[in-house]
Image (tube, rainbow, N blue to C red):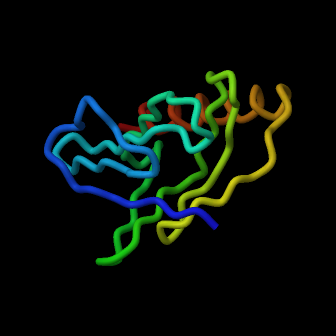
Amino acid sequence: MKTMQHKFVEFIPEDLKNRVLYITIKYRTAVHLCICGCGNKVVTPFSPIDWKLLFDGSTITLYPSIGNWNFDCQSHYFITNSRIKKVRRWSKRKIEDNRKEDADRKAEFYKTK
């Protein structure tokens, strides 16, 4: 199983390396290159309604999964304990349903704030 390294940085560098998750706590974001090798930059903001980062002092976990639905590759994977686990592609219907659920969850979150 492939692994993901991590680097805590203040600013995300311009030149990203494959299988390195760049984490900026200051800007509450992580960035990495898509694990399929297509070269696309994947941005995962941290928030109660986006991604969550767990750092146990040695490994990183990014939750939920990363689904690159806007990329041609449409790669889908988890990063858990610094391990990359590819998972099945989603159908267009499942992607649309997930986007709607996500939008509804965000609308509800901001409505209560």
Q: Is residue 69 above or below residue 76?
A: above
Q: Position of residue 94 (x, y in %)?
A: 81, 34
Q: Position of residue 72 (x, y in %)?
A: 68, 22
Would residue 21 appear left or right of 36 to someone viewing this image? Answer: left
Q: Quadrant of residue 60?
A: bottom left
Q: Nearer the viewer, residue 53 or 105?
A: 53
Q: Nearer the viewer, residue 109 or 59?
A: 59
Q: Is residue 4 above or below residue 44?
A: below
Residue at image x 60%, y 50%? 65
Would residue 60 appear left or right of 104 to someone viewing this image? Answer: left
Residue at image x 56%, y 44%? 35
Q: Is residue 37 above or below residue 3?
A: above
Would residue 59 appear left or right of 93 to someone viewing this image? Answer: left
Q: Position of residue 11 (x, y in %)?
A: 17, 38
Q: Position of residue 96 (x, y in %)?
A: 76, 26
- Quadrant containing the N terminus is bottom right
Would residue 41 appear left or right of 13 to someone viewing this image? Answer: right
- Quadrant containing the C terminus is top left
Q: Is residue 27 above or below residue 62?
A: above
Badge count? 0
Residue at image x 37%, y 46%? 46
Q: Nearer the viewer, residue 8 or 1?
A: 1
Q: Nearer the viewer, residue 112 or 33?
A: 33
